[in-house]
Image (spheres, coloured by chain):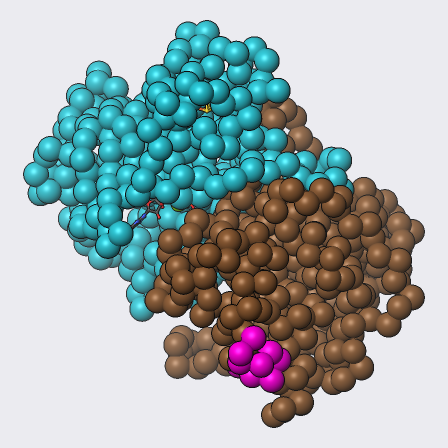
Chain colours: A brown, B cyan
Amino acid sequence: MASAETPAAPAPDTAAADPIMNVKGLVKHFPLRSGVVIKRQVGAVQAVDGVDLQVRPGETIGVVGESGCGKSTLAKLLIGLETPTAGSISLTGREMVGASGGKLKAMRRDVQMIFQDPYTSLNPRMTVGDIIAEPLEIHPDAVPKAQRTERVRELMSLVGLSPEHIDRYAHQFSGGQRQRIGIARGLALNPKLLICDEPVSALDVSVQAQVINLLQDLQNRLGISLIFIAHDLSVVRHISHRVAVMYLGRIVELGDKEQVYNNPQHPYTKALLSAVPNPDPAMRGKGNQIVLEGDPPSPANPPSGCRFRTRCWKAQAKCAEVDPGLELTSSGARAACHFPGDTPSQPEVAA
Amino acid sequence: MFSQKTTSPVEEGKPEVDENQPLLQVRDLSVVFRTREGSAQAVNKVDLDLARGQTLAILGESGSGKSVTAQAIMGILDMPPAEITSGTIKFRGKDLLTMPEKERRLYRGQRISMVFQDALSALNPVYTVGEQIGELFTVHRGMSRKDAKKKSIELMDKVRIPGAAARVTDYPHQFSGGMRQRIMIAMAIALDPDIIIADEPTTALDVTVQAQVMELLAEMRRETGSGLILITHDLGVVAETADMISVMYAGRTVEHGPATKVFANPAHPYTLGLLESMPRLTGAGDRLYAIPGLPPSLLNLPSGCPFAARCPRAEDICRQDPPPPAVEIDGTRFSACHFAEEVVAHGVR
Ligand SMILES: Nc1ncnc2c1ncn2[C@@H]1O[C@H](COP(=O)(O)OP(=O)(O)OP(=O)(O)O)[C@@H](O)[C@H]1O
Ligand SMILES: Nc1ncnc2c1ncn2[C@@H]1O[C@H](COP(=O)(O)OP(=O)(O)OP(=O)(O)O)[C@@H](O)[C@H]1O
Ligand code: SF4
Ligand code: SF4
Ligand SMILES: [Mg+2]
Ligand SMILES: [Mg+2]
C-alpha cells in the first residue's frame, strides 16, 4: 500500500451537501445499579448527554476528549450497538432510533466500526477469510454466496493484505496487519460511514502511519466518511477535516481542524492542546502547559451550568447558573462557553 | 510519608542487597515461545542497564519483544509457552534468573514493581481499591488491617485521588481511567521499590491525564531515587521524560543511547524510519512516511540483519552477515548496524 502516492484528501467541499448522518440531541444514560454500593443513591451515568452532529459525505471528523467523556459510547450509539436514552440519528434521511427488524439491519450495513485493539477484537480461532466474510454472512443478500470468497480476496488486496493468506489465522499476523484485517471487515459491506475507535493507539508510529495512509487512500477512492476517535492530537490533526472536542458527555467545541487547533475557543480545548508532549527532548520543560486542577467530575453527578466550570480558570458566577450552548464563535468554530477564545471573563456583579 | 522506611520488623521481608552493585544489568537475554508452528524468538540477546534515578524508555515495533522483556525482568513470564534460553538479569549484582522462586518472590513488588497498560483488568473488580493497596502492607509488612488502611489513604493522597479517605472503600469501576491508572501507580510505589516498570502506562489516557501520570512517576523518582523503565509508542512522552532510550526491532536492541542524541541523530536506520513516521502537531496534511514492508517472522529470522528487507541503506553484506550487536559511537551509544557511523553522519539517503 505504500506505493499509492495519493496525498491526503482535501477537505471535501460538501458543507452544503446533505449530511449522510444527522445526530440530534443524542443521550445515553447508564443506570447505576443499587446493589453494588449500598450507600450511594441510585442514579445514572450520563455517558452521552445531548450530542448534535452532522456527518458530511467524504469527510473525516476527529473526536478527542478526556478519558471517560463518552467517545466510545457515542460510537456505539451511532452503529446501533447501544440504544439511546433520547435523541435521533438519521442516516441518509432514515431514522435509526426505534427502527427494528429488516429496516434497522439495512441501515446498520451503512455504518461500520473498527475497534481499538487488533489483538483482542479478532477471534484467534477464525481464519482471516472467515473474519472478513463475517459481515457478509450476517447480511447474506449483500453478496451472493458464490461470490463471497472473491469479494474477500478483493477486500484483502484493497487493504494491502496478500489474498494468498486468506486461510491464515489472525495470530499469525502482526499488529498492523491485524488492524488491516479489521478494516477489511469494516469495509466488506461498502459502508457510507466508518467509525474508528482508537484504531492506532496500540501500534508503533510506523504501523500507525501505514494505517492512517490506508484510511486516507480508501476515503479518496471510495468517498466514505470517517469518524476517528483518538487520544493522539497530532494524529487527529493529520487525518481530520473537522474536529469535535468532548467533555463529560457533551461536544464542547466543533469546527474545522485549523480553527480548532490554531485558535481554540473553549478553555478545555486550550488545556488539551497545551498538554500534547513535544517530541523533541531539547524542548523539554519549555512548553506552556495549562495544568487542569482536580479531576473530571463524576458523569453520574455533573456540575450545574457549564460542566467544565469546576476546573476552568475563567469560571464566573454565570457559569454555574447557565448551561452554555454550542454557539458560533469568532474563529468560525462552535464552542459551548460563555467566554470563548480571548474574551475576558468578567464577574457579572462587582464583589 | 511512605518513602521513609518503616521500622516494622517485617521490613526484613525486603531482600538485602549490595547498594554498590549496579541497579539493573540485563545481559544476553533470550526468550523463545514454543508454539504449534515452531519456536518464535521473541527476545534475542538483549542487554539493558538501568541506574538509580534514571528513566530508560524502550521503543520499538509492535511485537518486537518490549513487553516480554519487561515480564522477564519482573518474573511474570508464562513458562511455558515462554522459555528463557540465555542470559542473566542482575539486580544489585544478584542474578534473578538463577535464584529460587521463594527468594525471587521477595523482589517482586518490593524491589521491582510494574504498572500495566490496562489498569481495569489489572485490578480485581470485587475488592475495594483500599483492600487491594492495603493487602501489600498486610502481606509484606505484617501490618494490621487498620494500619494498612491508613497507609492506603496516605498513598491515594499521594497520587492525588481527591477525597481519598472517603474513596478508599470504592471499587475500581467507580473510578475514571486516569484515576485507576493512578491507583495502579500507588500500588507500584507502595513498597518503595528500586525499579518501576511501566508498560504503556498512558496509552489509554487522554493527554491531560497522561501529563499528570507522567509527572507523578517523575516525582516518585525524584523522591525515592528509583529507576523507571518506560515502554511506550508515544515518542512525545519519551522525548519529555527519558534519559536513555533502547530501540527494539524483531527481538533485538538495535540502538541504545542518551535520549537527546537518539532523537537528534539516530544511529540505526530503523530508528530513523520510526522518527520519520511521526505526525507532527505542526505541519499537518501531507502523506505520512511509513517504513515499507513487514517485520520478519520470528519463527524464521533471516541470517543477516533482521531489518535488511526494509532498510533503505541495506547492501549485500546486510543480507549475508548479521551486523555487530553493538557498534560504539562517540563513546556514549550503540547501534546494531553494519553502517552505524555512516548513518550517524549522513542518515540513510
Ligand atoms: N455499560 C456501561 N455501564 C455503566 N457505565 C458505563 C458503561 N459504558 C460506559 N460507561 C461509563 O460512561 C462513561 C463514558 O464511557 P466511554 O467508554 O464512552 O468513554 P470514552 O470517552 O470512550 O473513554 P476512553 O477515552 O477512556 O476510552 C464513563 O464514565 C464510563 O464509566
Ligand atoms: N504467549 C505467546 N505465545 C506465542 N507468542 C507470543 C506469546 N506472547 C508473545 N508472543 C510473541 O512475542 C513477540 C513479542 O511480544 P511482545 O508482547 O513483547 O511485543 P511488544 O514489543 O510489547 O509489542 P506491542 O508494542 O505491540 O505491545 C510477539 O511477536 C508476540 O507475538
Ligand atoms: S462557560 Fe465558564 S466555566 Fe464553562 S468553559 Fe466557559 S468560562 Fe469556563
Ligand atoms: S545492517 Fe544494513 S540492513 Fe541492517 S540496518 Fe544497517 S544498513 Fe540497514
Ligand atoms: Mg473509549
Ligand atoms: Mg507490549
Q: Residue furthest top?
A: B330
- Image check: B201 left or right of B210? left
In terms of depth relative to the viewer, which is nearer, A241 or B56? A241
How far across and how far down the image is residue A78, in percent?
Answer: 65, 73
Query: What is the quadrant of residue A18 in the picture?
Result: bottom right
Q: Nearer the viewer, residue A215 or B58?
A: A215
Is B243 above or below relative to B124? above
Residue drawn at the location 45% of the way across and 70% of the way down = A130
The residue furthest bottom is: A101
Residue plotted at (56% across, 37% down): B292
Q: Position of residue B216 (x, y in %)?
A: 47, 39
Residue visible at 30% across and 25% down?
B47
Determine if the magenta segment contains residue A144.
yes
The answer to whether residue A56 is magenta is: no
Query: Does residue A267 appear left or right of residue A121 in this picture?
Result: right
Where residue B33 appears, as percent x and y from the top left, is 24, 46
Is B24 placed above or below B208 here?
A: above
The residue segment tinted magenta is: A138-147
Q: Is residue B9 visible?
A: no
Q: Main secondary structure of the magenta part?
A: loop
Front position in the image: B95 or A134: A134
Give the residue at x 44% y 57%.
A165
Residue B236 appears at what percent x and percent y? 57, 35
> Where is B55 relative to B78, above or below?
above
Tell me if I can see residue B339 in this picture: yes
